Amino acid sequence: MMISQLFILSSKGDHLIYKDYRGEAGSDVVNIFYEKVTALTGDQPPVVMSHKDLHFVHIRQGGLYWVATTTADSSPFTITEFLNRLSALVKDYCGSLSEKAVQMNFALIHELLDEVLDYGYIQTTSSDILKNFIQTEAVSSRPFSLFDLSNVGLFGAETQQSKVAPSSAATRPIQSSRDQGGKSEIFVDVIERMSVVIGSNGVLMKADIEGEIRVKCYMPSCSEIRIGLNEEFSVGKSQLRGYGAAVRVDECSFHQTVQLDEFDSHRILRLCPSQGEQTVMQYQLSDDLPSAPPFRLFPTIERDSAGRLLMYLKLRCDLPPKSTAINVSASIPVPKGSVSLSQELSSPDQSADLKLQSRAVVWQIPRCSGGTQLSALFKLEVPGLSSASMLEVGPVGLSFELPKLTATGLQIRFLRLSPIHPSTSQRWVRYVTHSDSYVIRI
Amino acid sequence: MPYLSGKETVKEIRRALSNPNIQSDPLRYRNTVLKVIRAMSQGVDVSDLFSEMVKACATVDVVQKKLVYVFLCSYAHLNPELSLLVVNTLRKDCLDPNPMVRSLALRSMTNLRLPSLVEYVEQPLTAGLRDRAACVRRVAVLGWAKLHNLQPGSEIDATVVNELYSLLRDPDPVVMVNCLRALEEILKEEGGVVINKPITHHLLNRLKECDIWGQSEVLRVLQRYRPQSEDELFDILSLLDSSLVSPHPPVMAATLCLFLSLCSSLPAVSQAALERVRGSLLAACGSGSREMRFTALCHIQLLLRSVPGLLGEHYKRFFCSYAEPAYIKRRKMQVLVELVNDENVVMILDELKGYCTDVNTDTAQAAISAIGRIGRSYSDKCLEILTGLLGLKRDQITSAVVQTLCDLVWVCPQCSDTVSLALEGCEEVLQDSQGKQALLWLLGMYGERVSSAPYTLETFIDGVRSEASLEMKMELLTSTMKLFLCRPAETQDMLGRLLHYCIEEERDMCVRGQALLYYRLLHCGIEETRNVLQGRRSDPSMGVLIGRPTEPINRWVSSFNTLEPLKHCSVETESASRGSPEHLASIPKPNTDLPDKLDCRQLEIVHSEEQLTIWELNFRALNVPTSVQIAKFIKQ
């Protein structure tokens, strides 16, 4: 079980990083890999490919190929997990993950690769241990921009009142704070991915939520944090639900460093976060959502006298009134051979396009607040439209983002640092729910 | 400097590296070295700079040292003589007070991969094993493995091996795991590190100290251990229980592997382990990383081969999300087919139906054939969906459906009525030759019941001159022959034309041979022809072949947690459908000319799955699957 070579390629096949740990095969395998991966047809699984007795295992992350060559008896779980962890480390150290970031920080990445693997054996991937060994400074690929000053308040004072963290705040290298006297900050993100299927009769057929609590720590010396969850948080199906807003998940698992002695009684997680990003807790909930699914669609589909396909769609947002969904995009598959689209949308900030490549009408809604209802009328020119081809319309796929909201209702009651840090340290708690897959059948 | 060629870049850098002004300014010197590495990463050949870089390695700047070592390790094999110069610097660094510098020097020294340097490396390596700092010991331990592999066939140094064994008790868990790794490599000829009772118990006790990578490694090595008593076995199992439900897939997979190998003689315990691991596997299937999802899915397919009922109630976890790549969707559908039972069949079919019109044709085809698979046990519901899809009149969908129907009636002849009704009109939509071939085969089989069959065949026969595909022509010949037997008046003329063309004008030997065979067959009289072409499809005992028996776990356990399950394009997922009784009943007449001794020999063949597919193929291609031919095939 070892990794013979490791390399990072851009999506165009440029060699960004190449490291040979065991000297068992030449560097020409990089090109062999790229030829193979680009020649794959759709039905061939790409994760593992082989060339003679060499095996390539790769992942795609940040638009890059992260490839390890290894022997056939290696554990695929270990290697994929390792490559994922490596890309996360690179992201932590470089601030962001892109071709440019990797190119600019190649020295740092070489250093990382030296420490993480020796002779192809994984040594450590913990950023706590690694920080003692990594000497190179990260080069941030983000150019200086006036917009970054937006969180600096009037008269140059730091706006402590501002409750919203700038979106760029968490995409910086973990070590820059050490020397630049930067802010010591900690971010606790609750991220949920929702996957829902709603039947053509409006019945909720499947609803799954996969959630995680992620801690991103930019503190040079953080001894312990305590994260308090909702007190009425319960795990498992058996527990009876009382009145009120109980928060329930089916299963949850914790990072090995999390101390759970206060979890059963007070729902408090204790941990000493290492620098960089780590997933502290993961949880799942299936089939039993605490609230209505965020979107419903009411479609009417018919053929008009001129042989055009008429689609009248009403989209209702069932979020609580104060919440909003952003970047909503509905993709409606349409019959093959659709030529052109005319549209009537309920407000000017929306837009819709006919994407011939994916055979779908994509309806973009930048923002949609709870309790509102949007409508759209699409007229499609489809030569030779038959009643059978009407069956090709649907199912509608919806993608969106729900900021400041968790679908399970999980909340962070408090986030305490001990020992109490001076006021320079900032704590941020952020919530977001993404649509992993939100399908509404027609 | 993108507009400079590689050579000029090298020249430029060399000038800078030997410039005394730069050499005296640490920051500029480091930046120049950085340029070398950058050029190296971009694929420029910078090996000419070797001697300049050797000089650059004598520095107190750790970052620069690291960079130079990266360079030296990549190019040392091209300059063995010059590399000797580095050794002195490296050996000096091995005595540095800073443990980080010591470990760096030791690692670089062993990474030079030069057999000529071995004698200089041994002494610092020996010292490294006893270093105060764990990070140096880690490097030193693996260094011995590197050294050993540099000199294949050399004697194994017993003192080193002993020292490594004693370092298994090192307080640092990474050193311990590295010792295991090094011993595995050094003692490869003797079967790897000795796993006896004290070592096993020591490793198990320290398992919790290791990180997930170390744990997976230890668990893997422990697979060789055989407990001496049942009590010991169960002690080990209960110790490992928490790892079995670990949220980290590598640990979970390695533990399960160990469980299965320890309990190979206790099927009930193995079964319980599989059930215990279910939650973690399902979680891995929903992981944020699609590669991890894929890995978990492939392993679930392995598990289902032995425990088909394991995940029946969790079928919704295998519904595809629409943004997933096609290769994951395909696997999920394969799993869904295995999970079908009376309770969930409606939901699963409903979900699969939604995928059939997917933009991605691979996904659509996979969904259609998945429905076909389910149709072997739930034919009515599936036929309804499949025939409904034909109404869309889309060439790719129709082609996939016709091919699926073909497979379905082969296994479930009771579907033939519905299928033959649905075939009308398909020929206008079909574009590709696989779809057309399947249609021809169906028309040959059930031509009696499809009123337009002769006209469809006639269109194909009229176009046979421009037909490029060999398989199409063979199929056309057979189908026309079969149709002739049931509808002679309408078909006689076109069969004559086809045979004439194939015998006189066709250039391909196979087609010619086949046509001649049919021609001569017709000379023997219509009864004889009927006997050959419409003979019984197969003998009754073949019905058993449809359902796949659950396999014992040890059939796949050796490939669990290896790359093997991920490699195959698509595992032949023979659906676990039960051999339908209707099918057995529909066999028309008892066989008289089957040799008695066939039965026992057939059993041998049933064991191998590949054989089965060859069988099916042969029948389909020859289309004259009489028992005579089965016998012939077996004798081969």
Image: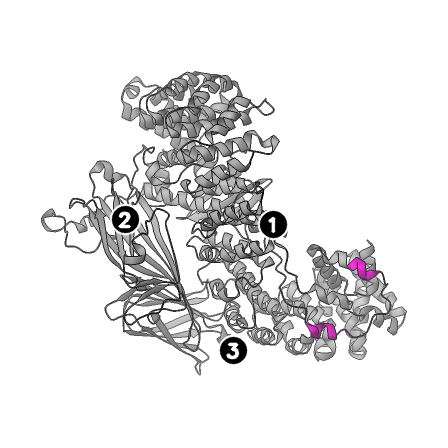
Residue A59 in the figure: left or right of residue A343:
right
Q: Does the magenta stretch include residue B582?
A: yes
In front of the other: B317 or B194: B194
- Same chain assignment for discs 1 and 3: no
Above or below, comparing residue B4 to residue A83 in the picture: above
Above or below, comparing residue B439 to residue A71 in the picture: below
Tag 2–tag 1 contact (CB < 8 Å): no
Residue B163 in the figure: left or right of residue A137:
right
Residue picked out by circle 3: A386
Badge 2 amino acid: Ala
Residue A88 lies, in percent from the top left, at 37, 45
Query: Quadrant of the rendered structure where residue B38 is?
Result: top left
Q: In the rendered structure, which segment of residues is drawn in magenta?
A: B573-602
Q: Rate crowding at label 1 as few (under 14), some (14 to 19) or many (20 or more) other CA atoms within 10 Å.
A: some
Above or below, comparing residue A165 to residue A399 in the picture: above
Q: Does the magenta stretch include residue B589?
A: yes
Say what secondary structure mark 3 lies in. Answer: loop
